[in-house]
Structure formats: C-alpha cells, structure tokens
Image (tube, helix red, strand yellow):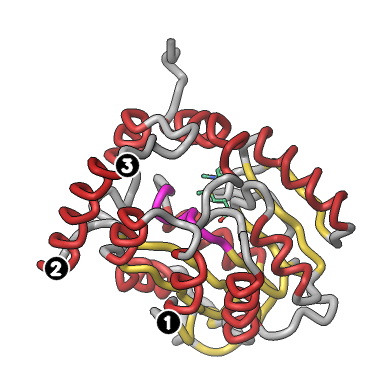
Amino acid sequence: MAGQNWTIKDEIRDYWSGRAASFDLSPGHEIFAEDERHAWHALIEKHLGAGAGRDALDLASGTGVISRLLCERGYSVTGLDFSEPMLERAEAKAKAHGLDARYVMGDAENTLLADAAYDVIMTRHLVWTLPDPAAAFADWFRVLKPGGRVLIVDADMAARTLRSRLLRKAAAVLKRFADTADRPGVDKERHNRIVAQVHFSGGARAEDVAALLRDAGFQNIAIDRGFSPIRRAQGRHMPLHQRIDRASQDRYAIQASKPVQQAVQAPGDSLRAA
Ligand SMILES: C[S@@+](CC[C@H](N)C(=O)[O-])C[C@H]1O[C@@H](n2cnc3c(N)ncnc32)[C@H](O)[C@@H]1O
C-alpha cells in the first residue's frame, strides 16, 4: 500500500521496474534485425553526428538499447535511469557486448550530473512520462556543453485526426480477433493511472515539446517525422493490430542545441552575448 510520501515518481519507477524483465521481448523496444539497427544509426548520424569518442548521455536508458546504438556510433556513453532492474540489465548488456558505457541511478528531471559535461543527450520514450518536463529540460540544458545537442525520440499517442481515430478502432477490432495476450509485464490500470498524472496526459504533441525546449533556452529546434524506415523494420516483427495502432500515433524525433554563447543580463544592461 502506498504511504503518504509515495509520489507519482515512485509509481512511475515501480511500473518500469515491473516491466524490466520482459522489456526486451517487445519489438519497438529491443532491436531484432539489422535493417532496424541501420535505420537508428542513420537517425543518430543525421541529428547528432559521429561519436568520435565524444561524451553522450542516454537519459532513461532502460535496458540500454539506445546506449548500445550510441556506442556503435563511437560515443562514450553514460546511461541514467531511476529503475534498478533496468540498470542491472543495461549493465549486463554493456559487459556482454564490450561497450564503452557506464550507468548511474538518477532522476532525469534532476540528474545531479556535472555542468557542461556532455556533447550530446539522447532520450527515447521518456518525455511523455515526465511529471515536470520544464524542470527536466532546464537540467539537460545545464549538463550539455555549449554547442551540445539533445535528441528526443517520442510519440504523441493521442488520436487527434479522423485517420488516427479510424486506425485506432481498426487496431482494437483486429486485436480482439487476433486473440493475442497483452504485452508481458504491462499493468494497464497502473499505466492509465500514471498517464492521467503526467504533464502530457493529453498526449505529447511534438510542437508542445519543442515549445518547452525553446523556453529552456535551446535553439535550432527541428522536428523530424521521417520514421518510415524504423517503423517498417519494427513492423515486420509486430502483429498486424500493433502495426496499425502504431500507424495511428505521431512518432517523431526532436533535435535542439544549446547555444555556443549564452545570453546574460548584467544589472542595468540590455541582453548581450556572454
Ligand atoms: C519506455 S522505457 C524507455 C527505455 C529506453 N529509453 C528505451 O527507449 O529503450 C522508460 C524508461 O524511463 C525510465 N524513467 C522514467 N522516468 C524517469 C525519470 N524521471 N528518471 C529516470 N528514469 C526514468 C524508466 O525507469 C524506464 O527505464
């Protein structure tokens, strides 16, 4: 039974810890084919460039799927997550594959990492589940080096158009006939309880995420919806109803950078470059 000090963060952490053991069984989480791996590499190259030994932070690293991709692109990776079972799996994988990755336990909204320590930050499927994304983005801005880049990969699950509502309905009908069990480890009730309490409870619209990044001081913000290669590759490993459900969602990557020079305001002064 949750005590008085039990917060939404504890609920979210427990939910993901409960999913850690089966997380990598799902297409869309772990990578099951080389064409998907290549498509992710292309996305990373496009938005973050080559690693060449630069420092990357994989926020909410889960079982380390994104960390591994970043290592393969030549980054030296730190993964951060607040779920111990997730971190254990990420650490085991890094060891098994000989990756240049280390893991720390922490809260992605308040990482407690050093200022200006990372060249890039990448985070997949985290932003939709943050209670306070504005606090998170301010912290990510702080830990990035000047000129550093963040790449957010996420999805707006709200069915906002007639097309996506129809696709969602078709997926639900097909799922009933397909007689497939829900994804292992998924506690739907708990999931819905969490979604009702997070910042983006009505869906994480890419434009709203971009606006919060701008408020935090990021610039050169670009939304990329070119997910077809990744979606096609993942789809080959998904049942039809899941493929259709995914097509109803708006999947996106958002790239943004920390200015090389930060604006500062001296007393009695107008804004000037530092
Ligand atoms: C959907 S999983 C994504 C894992 C990984 N990024 C991936 O794409 O494979 C969400 C992860 O976010 C972590 N998480 C959620 N909120 C967090 C927070 N505030 N701080 C740190 N980790 C968080 C969970 O523990 C879980 O591992």
CB-based contact (under 8 Å), mark 1 and mark 3: no
Which quadrant is home to the C terminus? bottom right
Relative to residue 155, is residue 215 depicted above or below? below
**262 relative to 70 in the view: left or right:** left
Task: Classify mark 2: helix, strand or loop.
Answer: loop
Point 61% across, 75% down: residue: 35
Q: Position of residue 213 (x, y in %)?
A: 43, 70
Q: Residues within 10 Å of mark 3 (few under 14, many from 20)?
A: some
Relative to residue 240, is residue 49 depicted above or below? below
Point 33% across, 49% down: residue: 199
Provide the residue designation for mark 3: 195
Which quadrant is home to the N terminus? top left
Provide the residue designation for mark 2: 161
Relative to residue 148, is residue 159 depicted above or below? above
Provide the residue designation for mark 1: 226
**156 relative to 29 in the view: left or right:** left
Task: Classify mark 1: helix, strand or loop.
Answer: loop
